[in-house]
Image (spheres, rainbow, N blue to C red):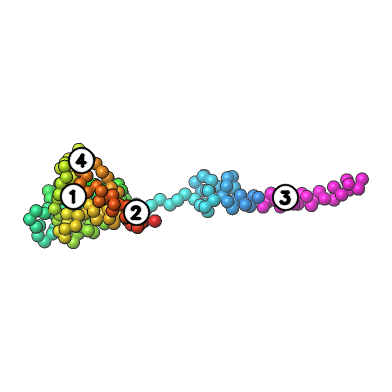
Amino acid sequence: MRANRMGRLNTPAVAALLLAGVAGLGFWLWHSGLPPFRLRQDGIYATGNGARGPAPSPALVDRPRLELPAPARVMPGYVRVTRVVDGDTIIVGDKERVRLIGIDTDEVPEDRVDPNSPGWRAALFVQDILRPDPQVKLQYDKERKDKYERTLAYVMLTDGRMLNEIIIKEGWARTIKIEPNTRYAGRFAELELEARDAGLGRWAR
């Protein structure tokens, strides 16, 4: 009789403890973002990082043409650069499309671009390098044209530096080794590794 009376007396306390435990567990699950305790606005359960809606889309802008001014004088053996297509392709002379050998930059959409994307920033970087004196000398490897009829070249600036090498060194491109045009492949690979380690350009952390 006494045991039954004690059980009846303890029942509300036990219930209160259980309720408090369930409430605490529910709060912890909600705070952790585990389903089904927090649902994002896009109908996807949050993953505990505090996200309460879809990630914002990048602000796209109409892609401008990266034209270059005419140099004061084109030196013998050099050709004028008229436009930058992207980080690894330029237009020289009379609409000749030149693909820089040994490097590959991120793609750039044809119509609208994200100004902060690695591909667009690489293109702007190349434009900035060429703008002061937009003329270059083209050096070739084993093949002079690719299957798209683009000229394949190592692009030399008027100060003697190679544009291909600068782009790799500053972290805006990956190396791409396509036989038989591999004269500087080893050097480019070393520069890419250094840029990665330093967190330069597209490798920024």
Q: Residue 81 in magenta? A: no
Q: Main secondary structure of the magenta part?
A: helix
N-terminal label among 4 and 1 = 1
Amino acid at the residue labelled 4: Pro
Q: Secondary structure at mark 3?
A: helix
Mark 4 nearby-residue class (10 Å; few <14, some 14–19, many ≥20): few
Compared across the picture, whether 136 is left or right of 35 comes to: left
N-terminal label among 2 and 3 = 3
Residue 154: assigned label: 1
Q: Quadrant of the N terminus?
A: top right
Residue depicted at 77% across the width and 49% down the height: 15
Let me know if residue 157 appears in the view.
Answer: yes
Q: Check disc 3 and report the residue beneath it.
A: 19
- Magenta highlight range: 1-24
Residue depicted at 88% across the width and 47% down the height: 3
Residue 196: assigned label: 2
Q: Check disc 4 and report the residue beneath it.
A: 180
